[in-house]
Image: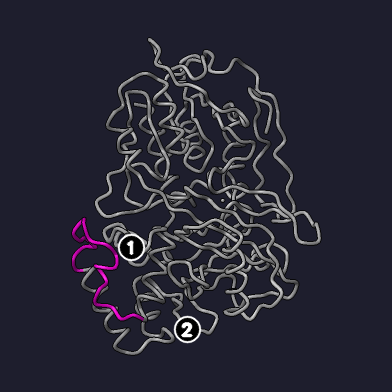
Amino acid sequence: MWFAAPRGGRCACGPAKPVPRPLLVYTPPRAAPVSGALGGTTGSKVRVAVIGAGWAGCAAAVEATRLGQQVTVFEATRIAGGRARRIESQLPDGTPLVLDNGQHILIGAYSETLRLMADVGMNAAASLLRQPLTLRFPDGAGLTFPRLPAPLDALAGIVTAQGWTWPDKLGLLRAALGWQLAGFQCAQELTVAQLCRGLSPAVMATLIEPLCVSALNTPADRASAQVYLRVLRDALFAQSGGSNLLLPRVDLSALLPDAALAWVAQRGGEVCLGRRAQSVVPAANGWRVDGALFDRVILACPPAEAARLLESCGLPCVSWLAHTRALQFEAITTVYAFSPGARLAQPMLTLRASAPEGDAPAQFVFDRGQLGGPAGLLAFVVSASSVDNAALTQRILGQGERQLGQAGLQAVQTVVEKRATFACLPGLQRPAIQVRPGLLACGDYVEGPYPATLEGAVRSGLQAAQLATK
């Protein structure tokens, strides 16, 4: 689920703070000039340019620094985080407000993301609200996993689910056992809807489809069954606590990117916010980024921007570009709404959505007042969104009033990420991490086992940095 500075500026973020800032307070990281020539000689250290400071780029920069490389980060915007970053807004009365450019959640199975947060000094217990997997509707239907070892928590959650008949539950248990016996493998061409065709409409509507659209951001009738099974395996069966929901209590830039860039800068790296890399050109002994010489380059920018830079380098990258251009993308819309008395029964609720985006477009709603924000602030999420207009916002406000019983909701801000994730389709072939010798790409869209998630982005960044040392 889901989010203009002077050109050529050279800056580094301030020190990482172990205690995160509250959502209502935003102090930009203090910029400090970094000495030394950009991309200049660093003795025996390998010089690595990381282009992009989203979650993949931050992971790559930290890992490359940890491996002893000299890192320079180029980021076109002044706020790190890419599609998971903070934005500034205000409440209807003009009170300043910090939001995100999309509502994200993490889960307990995001092991590399959590490890990276700890490495750069972030306190996950303070900055994330951890709770068992809960997919409850406002009327109480749905399921909640108890605090038991995996997979007993899933078994108990299914057995005690509200709103399902015993045939519903037994059908899901039989299907889950079959998936486990098959090693969570299936034919590559299957969709999630085809995989689950034997399940009841109630189970599909209240579990399978909400999980699919939240994890893969692709509707069940189009989403890859194989990727879905892999997510289920890792989240529900591989480790205790893997299915736990981790809800951010701080803005998404504060959750990891700010601390990661500060960590890199404190160890001699250069962090260039507000500076868009214009060209990547091969050189006799490396690569030149806007004329500065590097031994390795990691493209951690969005796929369209990575393709632009590759085209500028003048080298044949036909296969990589073809796979990148073949990707289809899904949008995510987040509508922030406010009512002074609004409060949900729990921080996150599942909503009954109508398809395709009728009078009930949102699949989830979050109570930001229970997550460090002001009381009364709600975030409605439309995954795999297809429209972007004022009518959508009004339909979501109406949905909130009907399903939540919240009258008087006022729109605060509507955020649409039109290319939020790639469409996770059956048999999809994603671009490789290794583009050319010494030129790598990372991001949630490159080859890997997971759909477009923060964990997928972090893992690809770590892998790109490790390959850059070879």
The quadrant where residue 311 appears: top left
Residue 415 in the image, given as x and y percentages of width and height: 59, 54
State the image coordinates of residue 143 (x, y, percent, origin top left): 44, 79
- Total numbered circles: 2
Label 1 to label 2: alpha-carbon separation: 27 Å
Name the residue at 29% across, 68% down. 193
Q: Position of residue 136 (x, y in %)?
A: 49, 77
Rendered residue at 50%/43% (across/down)? 55
Q: Is residue 389 left or right of residue 430?
A: right
Q: Secondary structure at mark 2?
A: loop
Q: Amino acid at mark 2?
A: Ala
**Figure colour scheme:** one colour
Q: As displayed, is residue 345 above or below residue 381? A: below
Which residue ends up furthest to the bottom in the rendered image?
Answer: 166
| Disc nearest the viewer among 1 and 2 | 2
Rendered image: mark on residue 141: 2
Residue 197 in magenta stretch = yes
Q: Nearer the viewer, residue 180 or 83?
A: 83
* Viewer-side residue, 198 vs 400: 400
- In the image, residue 454 sits, relative to residue 404, either above or below, namely above
Q: Residues within 10 Å of mark 2 (few under 14, many from 20)?
A: some
Name the residue tied to disc 1.
238
Q: Which of these two is toward me, 107 or 122?
A: 107
Range covered by the magenta-colored residues: 181-201
Which SS type dominates the magenta stretch? loop
Quadrant into which the C terminus falls: top left
Task: Name the amino acid, label 1.
Answer: Ala
The percent position of residue 330, horizontal first and vertical second, equals 43, 53
Name which residue lies at 51% across and 34% down. 52
